[in-house]
Amino acid sequence: MNSGSKFFKSYWMEILYLLMLLIVIISNFSSAQSMLIVKGVLVVSLWGMPYFLNTKFKVINTLILSGSIIWVTSTFFKTSRNDSSTLAVVVALMLFVVLVFNVLLVIKDMYQRKETSSRKHNGLKLTYVVFAFLIIIGTVLLSYSHIYENIQFNDPSSFVVGNPAIFSALYYSSTTYFTVGFGDITAVSDLARGISISQMILGYVITCLIIPTVLVAFQKLFDNEG
C-alpha cells in the first residue's frame, strides 16, 4: 500500500493525463454535438499538461499520442458520416498539436539537463529527434490516408483512381505529403483538393521544423569530439 501511494504521489499527473486522453478517445465514438464542448475542453487541457509531465514519460507519450491519433482516424472514419467525421478531424488535429508540443518539450528538457555536454547524451538527443520526427511524419501519412478513405467513402467521385489497390489511400497520402504526385490518383472534389492542400502545407511546416532541429542535434553531437 505504501509503495502504491508513493507511485501515485510521484506520477499522479501522468495518470490524470492518461485518463483524460482515454476519455477523449472513447468520447470520439459519440457523434453527439454536445460532446464537442467536452472534447474541446479535454484536448485544450491536454495541450498544457505535457509541460508538467516527467521527461521519460514524455518520450513514451510521443508514441502514445501518435497511436491515439491513428486510432481515432482508423476506427472512426470508416464507419462515420460527414458530421461525425468532422468531429473526428477536429479531435485528431488537436491531438496532433499536443504531439508536436510534447516533442518540442522533450527536446527542450534534454538540452537543459546538466549532462547536456556529454557525447553520450548528445547522441541520445539526436536519436530522439530523428525518432520523434519519423513518428510525426508517419502519423501524418496514416491519419491523412484515413481522411482520404472517408472522403472516398462518402463521395466516390471525389477521387479519380487509375488503378485501385488496397493501399491507394496511403499511397496518395505519401505522394501528396512529399509533393511528388504521379497523377495516377487525382483529387476531383473541392473537399478532397482542400484536404490535399492542407497536407502539402503541413508537410512543408514539419520539414521546416525537422531540418534545423536535426542540424543542431548533429552539431551538438560533434562539437565535443575534439
Image (cartoon, rainbow, N blue to C red):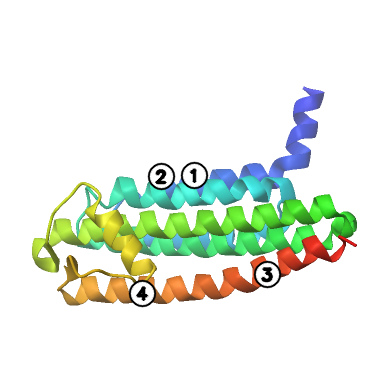
Give SS at disc 3: helix
Question: Residue tagged by mark 3?
Answer: 215
Give SS at disc 4: helix
Q: Check whether the beta carbons of the residues at disc 2 and disc 1 lie within 8 A of each other.
A: yes
Residue at the extreme front of the image, as rendered = 226
Q: Is there any visible trace of residue 35 in the rendered image?
A: no
Quick check: 54 left or right of 72? right
Question: Residue tagged by mark 4?
Answer: 198
Q: Position of residue 141 (x, y in %)?
A: 38, 58
Q: What type is the residue that disc 3 sits on?
A: Leu
Q: Position of residue 47 (x, y in %)?
A: 58, 63
Q: What type is the residue that disc 2 sits on?
A: Ile
**From mark 1 to mark 4, how far is it between C-alphas?**
27 Å
Task: Compare residues 68 and 163 and report the one nearer the observer.
Answer: 163
Give SS at disc 2: helix
Q: What type is the residue that disc 1 sits on?
A: Leu
Q: Position of residue 70 (x, y in %)?
A: 40, 50
Earlier-in-chain disc, 3 versus 4: 4
Question: Residue tagged by mark 1?
Answer: 22
Residue at the extreme top of the image, as rendered = 1
Give SS at disc 1: helix
